Image: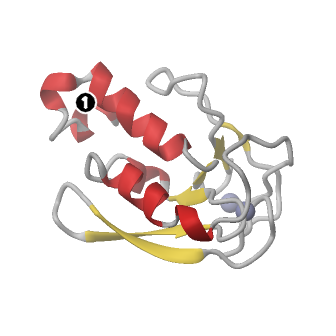
Amino acid sequence: MKCPKCNIIMDIVRTKSHYYQNLMLDQCPECGGIWVDEGELYQIQKGEARIIETKNMPKLKKSLMHDDRPAICPRHKIPMLTFRDPNFPSNIPARKCPICHNLFFERGDLTKWQAYVIRRWPTESDRWVGRVKK
Ligand SMILES: [Zn+2]
Ligand SMILES: [Zn+2]
């Protein structure tokens, strides 16, 4: 899979889910953005986003800043749209493909998203999957 912004092949990153299975995400070696299936987003075990994003920090080239380049879905070659959802914080500029519903997070934003979830649903932080996903 190619990065929606940089158009180069992304690295496969393994992470843990709430169900103790491995999930595979894609991370761009250039901008550090993360490509994730919408359903899988809610399955990533808490704390894992930070592990992924800090582990690969030394090899990522770009600084931790948002950029204005458009994101193009690598599968459908159409612009990805800003992800809007009542449960999703508006200060995280995630993008979503209107066809495959895959999401793209800029570097650091997946960690912000997990921090938000833990703050918002603190008592269910281990099992917030059903509450968030309608
Ligand atoms: Zn990239
Ligand atoms: Zn798509």
Left/right of residue 85 with respect to residue 49 in the rendered view: right
- On-image quarter of the C terminus: top left
Residue 63 at what x, y percent from top left? 71, 51
User: Is 9 rendered above or below residue 43?
Assistant: below
Q: Residue at x 44, y 24 (%)?
A: 87
Residue 9, position in %: x, y? 70, 79
Residue density around tag 1, few if under 14, some if 14–19, many if 20 or more, within 10 Å: few
Rendered residue at 29%/48% (across/down): 47
Q: Which residue is mark 1?
A: 131
Report which quarter residue 118 is drawn in. top left
The answer to whether residue 134 is seen in the rendering is: no
Q: Position of residue 13 (x, y in %)?
A: 45, 72
Describe residue 4's horizontal placement relative to residue 49 as left or right: right
The spot of residue 36 in percent (x, y) is 51, 58
Q: Nearer the viewer, residue 111 or 24?
A: 111
- Quarter of the image for the N terminus: give it: bottom right
Which quadrant contains ligand 1?
Answer: bottom right
Q: Does residue 22 sit above or below 57 in this rendering?
A: below
Q: Quadrant of residue 124?
A: top left
Q: What's the residue type where badge 1 is placed?
A: Arg
